[in-house]
Amino acid sequence: MNTDRILYADRNFAVVTKWVGEVCESLSGAENPYADGKRYISLPDSLKPVIENFMGQKIDFCQCVNRLDTPVSGICVLALSKDAFTQLSHVFRENNTEKMYMAVTEKSPGVLSVGEWHSLENYMIFDTKKQKAKITDEKTVKSKYAALDYRLVGTGVRYNFLEIKLKTGRTHQIRCQLAYAGHVIRGDVKYGARRSQKEGGIRLHNFRLAFTDPYRGTTKRFCVPPTKDSLWQVAWEAIENVSGTDVENI
């Protein structure tokens, strides 16, 4: 059984790589949010036996702490007990984390300078029926504050390559805020992309994650490059040139 996707595992949690198309919810329970006749792949359900093989023991609980959208790839933390889920959820809820993403966006009329950070602060509302977020001009009962920083790290003929520092964790936050600012992620038709990708998914990847281990008090740091197709490779090289990357996972 291939365990290459497991970056770290102990009796409390595992850190793994999520692929495009996987959902972060378990689909084996009675309350399946995707019970619509379509075929979905659950990250916790599919990786649970892989983690068991990696650790050499059975686990009774496996649930995502940080959730990436289905078309997004990157680093996910899986709690392996109810207590670990509670502890780690508190860590992430209190923003005791560093969450770095990279994106390939369609070129917009505005001009960005390489390496210069920009901030986005908005209030967002997520429509559960449409499964889509939107920006609102002011704070309301239903809206939530959303903040991120981003910068240009490189350009291609048709695309820009962005590095994103996520400050809050709202549903579809990066996709919605970047699109609102004129930086539509490649393949993200829901938020204004010109076309979908034949390979599926969108060009958004959570490449670096750091958080406090609630059981040891130490900081865990992880870095995972995106899949090695030509476009992602150019974007990754741009990230390395501007900000550097530490691929040693601890």
Image (cartoon, grey):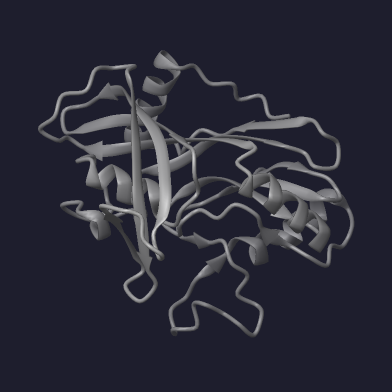
Residue depicted at x 25% and y 55%: 191
Pick the quarter of the image with the C terminus. top right
Q: Quadrant of residue 31?
A: bottom right
In the displayed structure image, the side of residue 66 where residue 168 appears, left or right: left
Depicted 209 relative to depicted 113: above or below: below
In which quadrant of the rendered view does residue 219 lie? top right
Residue 161 visible in the picture = yes
Taking the view exactly as shown, the residue that stands out farthest to the right is 57
- Residue 26 locus on image (x, y percent): 63, 70
Residue lying furthest left: 109
Q: Is residue 106 left or right of residue 17?
A: left
Residue 202 visible in image: no
Q: Nearer the viewer, residue 46 or 241?
A: 241
Q: How many marks?
A: 0
* Between 171 and 72, the one nearer to me in the picture: 171
Quadrant for residue 60, please give it: bottom right
Does residue 170 lie above or below 245 as drawn? below
**Residue 86 x, y percent position in the rendering:** 75, 57
Quarter in which the N terminus is drawn: bottom right
The single residue placed furthest to the top in the displayed view is 241
Percent position (x, y) of residue 113?
24, 17
- 220 to 168, vertically: above or below: above
Q: What residue is rendered at 54% in x and 67% in y?
A: 41
Q: Give the percent coordinates (x, y) of residue 153.
A: 33, 22
